[in-house]
Amino acid sequence: MSFSDPRIVAVAPMASEFNAFTGRFAQALRDAGLQPVEYEWGLRGLMQCDAVIFHWPDAFMNARDWKFAGEQLLRLWFCKIATGLKIVWLAHNALPHDTQGRGALFRHAFLRSLDGVIYLSERSRDLVRAAHRLPRGIAEQVTVHGAYPRSGSAFAPPTPGERVRLASIGLVRPYKNLSELTVAAQGVAAARIEVAIVGKRHDADYAAQLETAAGRDSAVRFQLSNALLSPGEIDAAIDRAHGVVLPYRKILNSGSAIHALSRGRPVLVPATGSMPALAELVGHDWVWLYDGLITPQVLTDFADHVRAMRPGSVPDLAALSWDRVTQDLRGFLGKLFAREEAVASMAGRQALR
């Protein structure tokens, strides 16, 4: 479907220094014939929009400021009634990270306001449906998390006698389960495996606990800072590693895994959420799954696998095409707006009777 007059779609956020996916998603909207703009919390800007897409609606799903959440919901509802605004959630996660169970009323109210949900895998749809009661007749679209441009150095396994360098990269936060990774790394041979934890001390107390628990003689190496890593620093950390470890207890989708794969690095992830589906799409050699806890044996098995991989090999990321995302968005939003036009047309015919 094409849009004769580009529909304005507010995206929250349209770009983020934390996550490159947001900017690429906004470009996919442009390629689909839509006009994405940054979401503004004020009423004036919102009334100019045809739809709003929330990536991480934590203000409602895990409300800390109830006054703010209530005011924003009222604005959204007003625009739904006054202008026909469509409200869409791109469900990266079924619930926000570090959810404390607060604000269930606002979570329910936000979900009831939705006109549509976009999922990044079939499994995501199943888990979101299991976690929430969505409005009857809500529009749903399953797409994929698009890959990042293939870049970085070609994969090269460790040379004989060289340690296998594994890395976990990004914000240091409790939900990433780095404490379990730190304990597991103490049980591997430091002469054979290095586990680097690289990123910003998002939670300073938690980061300090990890560094204390690791000890000086383990395979763990901390490369932490108080500033957010730049995209170049993240890329360099991935390129230095032979493999990337994401030991999250709960994982639905993972841009970090796809980022690593896009730079030709295999990933170690728990067999939960959409990760088994990602392994089917990309190949189990590149998405190495484990069940239960991450243990010294899990790390050792992954390191042995990485050491045996073919030099210069690359993952097949064709299934994660942004062209598919663009086509899915064009069809999904086209149908969503067509519903509005059909309702308006019916109301007009009834008014003429």
Image (tube, grey):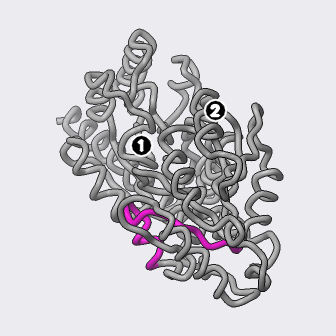
In-front residue for pair 188/125: 188
Give the farthest residue toward the bottom: 310
Q: Amino acid at mark 2?
A: Ala
Percent position of residue 1, x then y: 48, 63
In-front residue for pair 225/221: 221
Give the residue displayed 54% in from the left and 68% down from the top: 299
- Residue 195's label in the rendered image is none
In-front residue for pair 206/337: 206
Q: Amino acid at mark 1?
A: Trp
For mark 2, give the secondary structure. helix
Q: Which residues are magenta?
A: 264-280
Percent position of residue 233, x then y: 81, 51
User: Is there any visible trace of residue 30 in the rendered image?
Assistant: no
Q: Nearer the viewer, mark 1 or mark 2?
A: 2
From the viewer's perspective, is residue 156 above or below residue 272? below
Give the residue displayed 33% in from the left and 30% down from the top: 110
Is 108 on the left or on the right of 84, as rendered? left
Is 262 on the left or on the right of 293, as rendered? right
From the viewer's perspective, is residue 96 above or below residue 105? below
Q: Quadrant of residue 132?
A: top left
In-front residue for pair 74/55: 55
Give the residue displayed 77% in from the left and 85% down from the top: 160
Percent position of residue 176, x then y: 51, 46
Q: Report the residue marked by disc 1.
A: 89
Q: Is residue 254 magenta?
A: no
Q: Earlier in the sequence, mark 1 or mark 2?
A: 1
Q: Report the residue marked by disc 2.
A: 208
